[in-house]
Every structure is written in structure tokens, then in C-alpha cells.
Amino acid sequence: MTRTHSRSDSQARGRTSTAVMTRALLWGAIALATATAARASEAEDRKAVAALDTKYQKAVQDNDTQTMAAILADNFVLVEGDGKRWTKAELLKSTTNGKTHYERQEDSDRTIVVYGDTAVVTAKLWAKGIEDGEKVDYQQWFSDVYLRTAAGWRYAFAQASLSLPSSATR
């Protein structure tokens, strides 16, 4: 048995598929607009990371373990210029053992580049104070990697140079 389609059946199917496509496009546009609105602009991301990096440097200077812990990613790693590695737990412990305190923990010549959900901060750090019981006053270059998470930006990785020669400082 063959079925014949009337012209009105074809028109109804055409209207239905057009309505379905229109709804799908509308929902897709809404989803795209929502995702775009939810994601900050690159300039806003740089500003947010700069503020967080400044807050972190201040927390280090003040031995503010709570603020440092909130900013550092759980799997944070710092690699110093001589190859020594620090985890989040080791870094936080160094703020409470009384052997490290800074008068200054300031950065300059800072640049921030954002690559989607990753931001890289490069700057020159001036550290002055006591490290592991020894008096220090040095500058070094560093690069910090921040990752965007569901909870906001987190400081995930750092690489520091060896101390700069005194002729290259301040």
C-alpha cells in the first residue's frame, strides 16, 4: 500500500522542522551569549590576576598563611633558580616556623598574558628580610602561572631565577 502525501502534509512538516531549527538556534545563541557574558574580558582577567598576585606577595611579606593557602592551588609547585622545589604544604609551613620573614616582597616590571583559562605573570621581585634564619636582600625574575578554576583564579606554578647580580638590581 502506498501512501500519498498531500501538499498540506508537506507544508506542515516544513513548518515543524523550521520551528525546531529556530528553537535550536535560539537556545544555541542563548547558551553562547551566556558563556560569553560569564567569561571576563582579557583585560578584566589581567586586572584580576594582577590584583591576586599583589595580594599574594603581600601575604608572603606578612606571613599570612591563610591568604596564601586560599590563593595557592593544592598541587602548587615553586622551582627556584638552583632547582630546589617547594610544594604548597612546604611553602605554608615556612610561614609558620619563624625562620622566614620579609620586610619587602615587592615586584616590578610586571607583565601579564592571558591564554584562555591560563595567565602567566612575569616580573622582577625584590625580597628583603630573613629566609631560613639568614638575612637576605636580593632581586630575581620570576614567572607565575595562574589557572582559572570553578572557584576563581588559583596560583599553580612558579619558576624563579637565581638572584640577580647587585649591579643589575634597583
Image: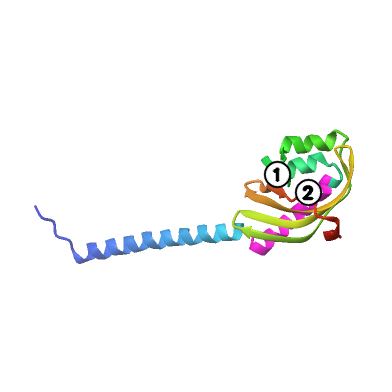
Decide which of 124, 68 is in the foreground and name it.
Answer: 124
Q: What residue type is labelled 1?
A: Val
Decide whether the magenta segment is chiefly helix, strand or loop. helix
Q: Is mark 1 on a helix, strand or loop?
A: strand
Residue at x 83% of width, y 42% of height: 64
Q: Which of marks 1 and 2 is in front?
A: 1
Along the line of sight, the residue nearer the viewer: 125 or 162: 162
Which residue is denoted by mark 1 in the rendering? 79
Q: Which of 10 and 136 is in front in this view?
A: 136
Under circle 2, the secondary element is helix
Residue 67, quarter of picture? top right
Q: Which amino acid does label 2 sit on?
A: Tyr
Q: Is residue 106 visible?
A: yes
Q: Percent from the top left, x then y, of residue 48?
A: 72, 57
Magenta residues, start to end = 40-60
Q: On the rendered structure, is 13 left or right of 28?
A: left
Q: Check the image and report above or below for 125 versus 15.
A: above
Give x and y (percent) for residue 28.
Answer: 46, 59
Residue bearing mark 2: 56
Residue 9 placement, left or right of 28: left
Residue 126, percent across and down?
Answer: 84, 54
Q: Can residue 73 be seen in this view?
A: no
Q: In which quarter of the image is the C terminus?
A: bottom right
- Residue 64 painted magenta: no
Residue at (59% x, 57% y) in the render: 116
Looking at the picture, does residue 12 appear above or below residue 153? below
Q: Who's the residue at 68% across and 41% down the image?
A: 76
Neighbourhood count class around disc 2 (C-alpha, 10 Å): few under 14, some 14–19, many 20 upward: many
Residue 50 part of the magenta-drawn span? yes
Question: How many numbered discs?
Answer: 2
